[in-house]
Amino acid sequence: MSFNSTPIEEIPVIRDALVKGFASGKTKNVQYRKDQLIHLSYLLHENRSRFVESLAIDLKRPALETDFLEIDGTIAEVREAYTNVEKWSKPESPAFSLNWFSMNPKIRKEPKGVVLIIGPFNVPLWCLLGPLAGAIAAGNTVAIKPSEMTPMTADVIAELFPKYLDPEVVRVVKGGIPQTSKLLEYPWGHICYTGSQRVAKIIGVAAAQTLTPVTFELGGKSPVIVDTSADLKLAARRILWGKCANAGQLCVAPDYVLVLREVEEQFIRELQQVYTAFFGSDPAKSDSISRIVSPQHTLRIKNLVESTKGNILIGGQIDVNERYVAPTIVTDVPGDDSLMTDEIFGPVLPIISVDSLNQAIGFINSRDHPLVLYIFSEDKKVKEKVFSSTNSGGAVANDVVILPAAAGLPFGGIGASGFGYTTGKWGFNTFTHFRGTLDVPSWLDKVVLGSRFPPYTDKKLADLKKNLNDTLPLRPGTRPVTALKRRWGWWILLALLSAIGALRKKRFVAANICRAAGRKSIGRGGLSQSCDE
Ligand code: NAD
């Protein structure tokens, strides 16, 4: 099988087919969407071995990582869309409003139309087919553009899609910059782009020309804080796994560690132990580590490692032709190091020691908002402090990487790590236009709305205003002192006092009746209470 890009002249034909597919109205039918989603899940399930093979060639990725981390995660996304599409696509009513309810206000969930999904090389199935599930569930027709950097996987996707999915609903465009540039000439209902910050700026400029809304799923440097209260064995195991899965080429990989000086030595000892347990004495011979996507990216990482001012504690072996980077741990890394400029996107872990939690937080806050922030700590207050005094796309305590797979949670970046969401209901919403509708009865003109018509008069204005609730909330620091409110307060107090007075009076009368009869009153029932015998 060889990678052939889609000829540029075919792109308008592909787009026309998708426009026709959308105009046919078939994707408005929710059952039709569900059928496509079922086919998509079987496409993944029945071709696991094809994808395991293609990613073994593209990235020398271990089967476990493709099968469990990527395919199962993507199938879960498709299944969630399949299970919930009826509920998600039902029209909703806004909160009741006396002024508006008679106009039958509704929020209709309309597809945005023909949408474009552009994927990266590193997790091609998850990044293309996850958003695709949301786009199909929302009723769109979709062009997807896999990365040219994982050509075998792009080939398998292009071969399988027409066999499983309606070609008027989903089409694949293979290729690189020329194909993407051609695609970007058109207006789309939405563009979902997953990739680097550099290319996102190009996509954003092109999308602005056609007024196409975009979602950017980007990366960046996701930090990990290791606190003094952390379970250091657990932290070392999870962090090293997250750093080395897919050879560090995950948007959610822990990029660097900020460790509290008090526990640094012990944490590094734990890392050394877990390193040998994971990869043996020669990681180049391990079947559990992927390769870097290209010699160019390997060279990029090599340059970063060679220019570090830190101390290479373990690893550091890099073979550009073999696209191999040994899992590498670098200690004593200064904040302005070569390893601290851009997202590393390779199995190299810089460790920076800090004197305090505040210093770690300050370090993170002085940089771009990360995609995910990780904190290892057994102390509730420390975790809360880190969550509440930083900002990031997402945040996880005591684990790494797994956040995008968590059902029901939004996943997306903030600032330089992207914007918008692509998972679960949040993905459905991304590809949905929330269309507000009203159905206004004619009789409203007789009751109230007639006053809006010319000729305008003061009386009409007063009539219109009468129906508006135009009271503003109180200014901060002011107390509710309006005459009306004060009066209501007094009335309530008076009513309470009167009720208490009445009750006491009843008891008093009842007790006197008993006394007159020469008996003692018992019970608490006021007049209905009884006297003893
Ligand atoms: P990339 O930006 O190089 O490529 C992504 C896509 O853009 C590819 O399909 C490519 O063909 C296209 N492209 C590249 N150059 C282009 C240009 N000049 N004009 C138009 N299109 C162009 O990204 P990558 O290296 O494949 O992916 C790695 C990046 O993606 C990392 O930064 C990673 O963090 C990020 N990522 C983010 C998420 C997330 O969910 N937030 C997921 C996976 C990867």
Image (spheres, rainbow, N blue to C red):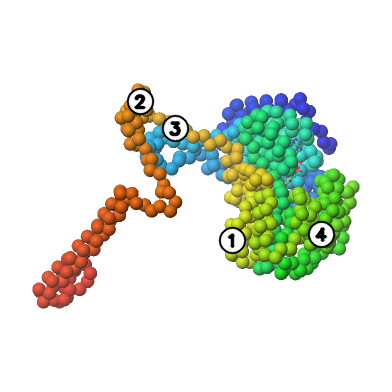
| Amino acid at dot 3 | Leu
Q: Earlier in the sequence, mark 3 or mark 1?
A: 1
Q: Earlier in the sequence, mark 4 or mark 2?
A: 4
Secondary structure under tag 2 reads loop
Spot occupied by residue 108 in the image (x, y as percentages of width and height): 51, 35
Q: How far is mark 1 from mark 2, CA to CA?
A: 57 Å
Q: Earlier in the sequence, mark 1 or mark 4?
A: 4
Other-residue count near label 3 (Cα within 10 Å), few / some / many at <14 / 14–19 / ≥20 = few
Q: Is mark 3 within 8 Å of ligand 1?
A: no
Question: Which quadrant does ligand 1 occupy?
Answer: top right
406 left or right, relative to 235:
left
Judging by the rendered image, the residue that carries numbered circle 3 is 438
Judging by the rendered image, the residue that carries numbered circle 2 is 456
Secondary structure under tag 3 reads loop
Residue placed most toward the observer, 474 or 61: 474
| Amino acid at dot 4 | Gly
